[in-house]
Image (spheres, rainbow, N blue to C red):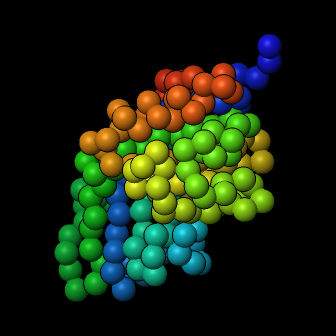
Amino acid sequence: MTSLNPIERCALIDLTDLPRVGFRGVDAAGWLTARGYSLPSAPNQAVTCDDGTLVARLSQTEYFLLGSLADRGQRIAAEEAGWVLGEARNYLLPRQDSHAWLQLSGKHVAEVMAKICGVDLRAEAFPLGSVAQTSVARLNVIVINAGSAELARFYLLCDRASVEYFQGAVLDAMGEFGGVPVDQENLLG
């Protein structure tokens, strides 16, 4: 028996209800910087802003923003709602309906992922802030190492229409580690 709570041991949390959005174009970096976002210096990297918003850089000109738990994604929702096509070559990529967002957390995240993904996601090969656009359980998934020194945490972004299948595959892989689904509210308490 362990004294770790489920989030520290092995937990899957559905964050799909939190806002997320993407932006693409040669002017996207300048537009986001002007709005106060910290940006990764290279593709396949992610940074967490002071307010908890996560910015993942998927290519030279594409960014995926995940809302903060602190404000329940209100900043990201406002960015999407207020975006207007202008002279800047920066284009909105709505992601609320296209991508589900799950959090896999706990000391067993790399072992769980090794069962369903061919990419080495151990800390030595996939450090904090790394992004992998890969296949997990036969689905295209964006994996973001959004952990901290205190908690190993991967964000998993997959096709929203396939999230039920994907959750089942991840939960099955978590079984030998005592993994459980956890309600989003447990992150706030």
Count the marks: how many? 0
Residue at 41% x, 38% y: name it: 166
Q: Quadrant of residue 145?
A: bottom right
Q: Quadrant of residue 25?
A: bottom left
Residue at 47% x, 34% y: name it: 169
Tell me the quarter of the image containing the C terminus. top right
Residue 75 visible: no
Q: Position of residue 138 (x, y in %)?
A: 42, 49
Q: Position of residue 178 (x, y in %)?
A: 66, 22
Residue 107 visible: yes
> Horizontally, is 90 left or right of 120 in the view?
left
Q: Of residues 36 and 147, which is closer to you in this image?
A: 147
Q: Quadrant of residue 174?
A: top right
Above or below residue 144? Residue 93 is below
Above or below residue 67? Residue 38 is below
Q: Position of residue 179 (x, y in %)?
A: 62, 25
> Horizontally, is 88 left or right of 169 in the view?
left
> Horizontally, is 130 left or right of 100 in the view?
right
Q: Of residues 184 and 180, which is closer to you in this image?
A: 180
Q: Position of residue 152 (x, y in %)?
A: 69, 43
Residue at 80% x, 13% y: name it: 1
Q: Of residues 105 and 38, which is closer to you in this image?
A: 105
Residue at 49% x, 60% y: name it: 134
| Residue at the farthest left position | 85
Q: Of residues 178 and 90, which is closer to you in this image?
A: 178
